[in-house]
Amino acid sequence: MELMELSWSEFQELYRSRGQVRTIRHGRDVAGFYWLEDRGRELHLHAIFVLPEFRGRGVGSATMRQIEEEFSADADFIELGVRDDNAGARSLYKRQGFVVAETLPDVGFTIMRKHIGNEPSN
Ligand SMILES: CC(C)(COP(=O)(O)OP(=O)(O)OC[C@H]1O[C@@H](n2cnc3c(N)ncnc32)[C@H](O)[C@@H]1OP(=O)(O)O)[C@@H](O)C(=O)NCCC(=O)NCCS
């Protein structure tokens, strides 16, 4: 919640009203969660969170690949926002082929996108 800068009650309201929150599993263990919103041909990844004890083992990368596979027929892009000081997450998204779509230096935030559908990107 701290990383997303949300209180629990704000998170609960968003969870009820926007998209879906899914659990990331590693074998039988809960390894984290991600929060997705289907916006028609664009899929917005609001958040991905891997529990500290599962980080650095490819869980985040595998989850991103699964999301892409699942939605490649229904969406053209995955979009997400990342804080400029979150070097770990930025490096993960870059490795997965996300590119910077917009920078918001006033709020220290970058919007990144990845083309995933069969339609040509423009
Ligand atoms: C960002 C986050 C989701 C990444 O998840 P993760 O499971 O650690 O990601 P991965 O393991 O796939 O990749 C992370 C690093 O581990 C390395 N790695 C990947 N597979 C590996 C493996 N099998 N063994 C060892 N290291 C591995 C990657 O090369 C990567 O290194 P890098 O930092 O040099 O790029 C996770 O750190 C997290 O939850 N952070 C806090 C919340 C957050 O910031 N979320 C993003 C908000 S936008």
Image (cartoon, helix red, strand yellow):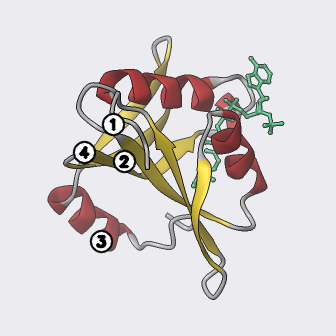
Query: Does dot 2 land on a helix, a strand or a loop?
Result: strand
Q: Are marks 2 and 1 in contact (CB under 8 Å)?
A: yes
Q: Quadrant of residue 15?
A: bottom left
Query: Could you say which disc has been placed on residue 41 in the image?
Result: 4
Whole-Å distance between the Cαs marked 4 and 1? 20 Å
Q: CA distance from mark 4 to mark 3?
A: 29 Å
Mark 4 belongs to which amino acid? Arg
Say which amino acid is labelled 3.
Ser
Q: Secondary structure at mark 4?
A: loop
Residue at image position (42%, 44%) is 78
Near-viewer residue (74 or 48):
74
Q: Is residue 70 above or below residue 85?
A: above
Residue 35: which numbered mark, if any? 2
Q: Which residue is mark 3?
A: 9
Disc 4 to disc 3: CB gap under 8 Å: no
Residue at the left extreme? 17
Amino acid type assigned to the residue bearing label 2 in the image: Trp
In percent of width and height, residue 121 lies at: 43, 43
Q: Earlier in the sequence, mark 2 or mark 1?
A: 1
Mark drawn on residue 46:
none
Residue 2 on image: x %, y %? 56, 68
Cα distance in 3D space between marks 3 and 1: 18 Å
Residue at 35% from the left image edge and 31% from the top image edge: 117
Which-is-in-front pick, marks 4 and 3?
Answer: 4
Q: Secondary structure at mark 3?
A: helix
Near mark 2 (Cα within 10 A), the count class, few <14, some 14-19 or many ≥20, is some
Q: Residues within 10 Å of mark 3 (few under 14, many from 20)?
A: few
Left or right position of 2 against 58:
left
Residue 56: x, y in percent?
75, 30
Q: Which residue is mark 1?
A: 22
